[in-house]
Image (spheres, rainbow, N blue to C red):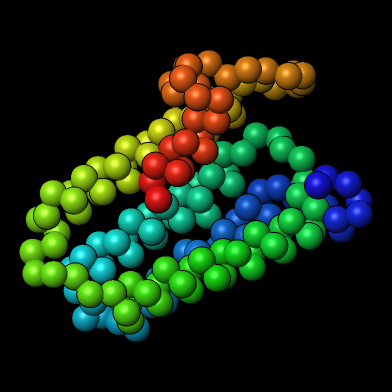
Amino acid sequence: YAGSAFGPPVPVRLAWFIQELPSLVVPLYYVSVHPDLPTPALFLMGLFICHYMHRTLIFPVLIRGGKPTPLVPFALAFIFCCYNGYLQSSYLCKHSTFPSGWTHDPRFIAGVALFFCGMSINIYSDHILRNLRKPGESGYKIPHGGLFEYVSGANFFGEIAEW
């Protein structure tokens, strides 16, 4: 997808920041206009916001080098994040219902633990990938350490476990 047929290049850090921004801004807006959210919905919105704070504000700053992103994939990612932010926020703020005591239910607690475990795996795996090559070095590298010892896409595994 890196060819010129997919549009002019967008600097990778700028692309990541802009494309992920709707998944951060939209939930923050929903929380601000729905101050009386039930605790479970507010907590789940907080997890979503936590993930996208990292993806929008921290991850792009940590990118080392990286090829520019063609305009078409960048635009598609932006559109996805607009819909994702809207759908998650709309559901949790307007349509979800939770039984009394849901935040103390073992399923809720296990889900939250799985989210943080997945987020930790994702962040650590991204760290391993960023540090595969020394500055100026190029070429194919195989990541080692963490869950890369067990799965080839540990960063993706962590993100899947989050959600």
Residue pictured at 64% horizontal, 64% vertical: 78
Judging depth in this view, the residue of 42 and 66 nearest the camera is 42
On the question of residue 5 being in view, the answer is yes
Residue 134 in sight in this render: no
Q: Which percent across, then down, holds residue 123?
A: 45, 36
Q: Is residue 59 above or below residue 27?
A: above
Quadrant of residue 83 within the rendered picture: bottom right
- Residue at 53% over, 54% down: 56
Q: Establish if 138 lies above or below 68.
A: above
| Residue 122: x %, y % from top left | 45, 37
Identify which residue is drawn at 47% across, 64% down: 24
Please indicate whether residue 73 sits to the left or right of residue 97 in the image: right
Q: How far from the left and from the top, in percent, is residue 48?
A: 38, 59
Q: Residue furthest right?
A: 5
Could you say where residue 135 lies in the image, as x and y percent from the top left?
70, 22
In the rendered structure, the answer to whether residue 62 lies left or right of residue 115 reads right
Q: Quadrant of residue 63?
A: top right
How many marks do you count on the picture? 0
Q: Is residue 30 left or right of residue 42?
A: right
Name the residue at 57% across, 70% down: 82
In the displayed structure, 89 sits above or below 51; it is: below
